[in-house]
């Protein structure tokens, strides 16, 4: 495998010591950094990242992996390597010309409509993912939110993991728990009580938490998110 690809994909160009020094704001994140020191974000291909996160909506990891595998096997390109068979992730054209029936047979369910419409927009040149790299975080996120099936979390994931917006701070159920448990003093007690019992957040609730995290952790908030996320998951697995 090309060493340049590995360098790029695993973000080895990031100055990790500097980044960690910038996000080490308190004892909580410090514990996460000490335990997981060396953890890096990945720089994924934007198209694959976008479709993968659209598929991930309201699904667990095994189901997401199965959907991506099905899409690749049915609509991607077959590659033989060392007597093993692999499949590439389908390109925008591959998905744009697929039928809803084909996409639903891959296990996408209601997501099939979102994937098909998004693929058509990208394939027709009506939406250019690479242009988003040149925009600031807010403008790039606004553009992503115009796509079918893309909400705040999906947009933040795509920005963070494929478009170099390291201030993006995706909020899932784990991150919500962490922030409400360890950073509740930064929010109104009524707000904490309200969202603590909810399985999902309204757009306004998401933005309130997201805005706090990006302001608190700064331009590398996405790295803080990753460290806190994995730290909490490890804690839970050991209980």
Image (tube, grey):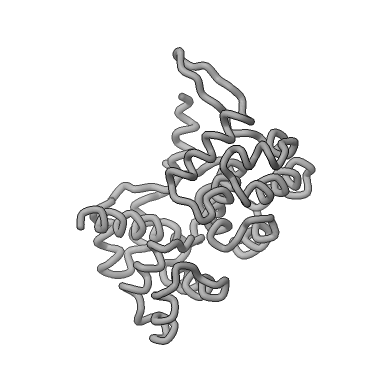
The residue lying toward the viewer, choosing from 1 and 235, is 235
Q: Where is residue 222 in the image (x, y as percent from the top left)?
A: 45, 58
Q: Residue at left 72%, top 44%? A: 122
The residue lying toward the viewer, choosing from 16 and 105, is 105
Q: In this view, does 225 lie above or below 2?
A: below
The residue lying toward the viewer, choosing from 13 and 86, is 86
Q: How many labels does the image show?
A: 0
Q: Residue at left 56%, top 52%? A: 158
Q: Position of residue 120 (x, y in %)?
A: 75, 44
Q: In this view, does 6 lie above or below 131?
A: above
Name the outermost residue toward the left: 239
Q: Position of residue 175 (x, y in %)?
A: 40, 64
Horizontal placement of 21 versus 205: left or right? Answer: left
Q: Position of residue 170 (x, y in %)?
A: 48, 60
| The C terminus - image quarter | bottom left
Name the outermost residue toward the top: 83
Horizontal placement of 131 versus 23: left or right? Answer: right
Q: Is residue 50 above or below residue 98?
A: below
Q: Residue at left 54%, top 51%? A: 164
Horizontal placement of 86 versus 185: left or right? Answer: right
């Amino acid at each position: 495998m090309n060493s340049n690809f590995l360098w790029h994909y695993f973000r080895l160009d990031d100055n990790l010591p500097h980044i960690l020094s910038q996000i080490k704001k308190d004892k909580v994140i410090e514990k996460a950094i000490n335990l997981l020191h060396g953890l890096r974000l990945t720089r994924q291909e934007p198209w694959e990242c976008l479709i993968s996160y659209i598929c991930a909506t309201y699904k667990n990891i095994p189901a997401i992996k199965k959907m991506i595998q099905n899409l690749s096997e049915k609509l991607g390109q077959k590659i033989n390597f060392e007597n093993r068979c692999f499949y590439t992730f389908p390109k925008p054209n591959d998905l744009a010309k697929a039928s809803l029936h084909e996409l639903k047979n891959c296990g996408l369910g209601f997501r099939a409509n979102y994937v098909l419409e998004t693929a058509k927009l990208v394939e027709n040149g009506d939406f250019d993912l690479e242009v988003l790299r040149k925009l600031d975080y807010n403008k790039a996120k606004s553009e992503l939110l115009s796509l079918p099936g893309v909400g705040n979390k999906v947009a933040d994931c795509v920005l963070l993991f494929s478009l170099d917006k390291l201030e993006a701070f995706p909020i899932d159920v784990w991150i919500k728990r962490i922030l409400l448990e360890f950073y509740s003093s930064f929010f109104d007690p009524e707000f904490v009580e309200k969202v603590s019992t909810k399985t999902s957040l309204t757009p306004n609730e998401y933005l309130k938490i997201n805005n706090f995290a990006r302001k608190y952790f700064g331009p590398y908030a996405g790295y803080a998110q990753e460290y806190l996320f994995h730290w909490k998951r490890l804690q839970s697995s050991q209980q």
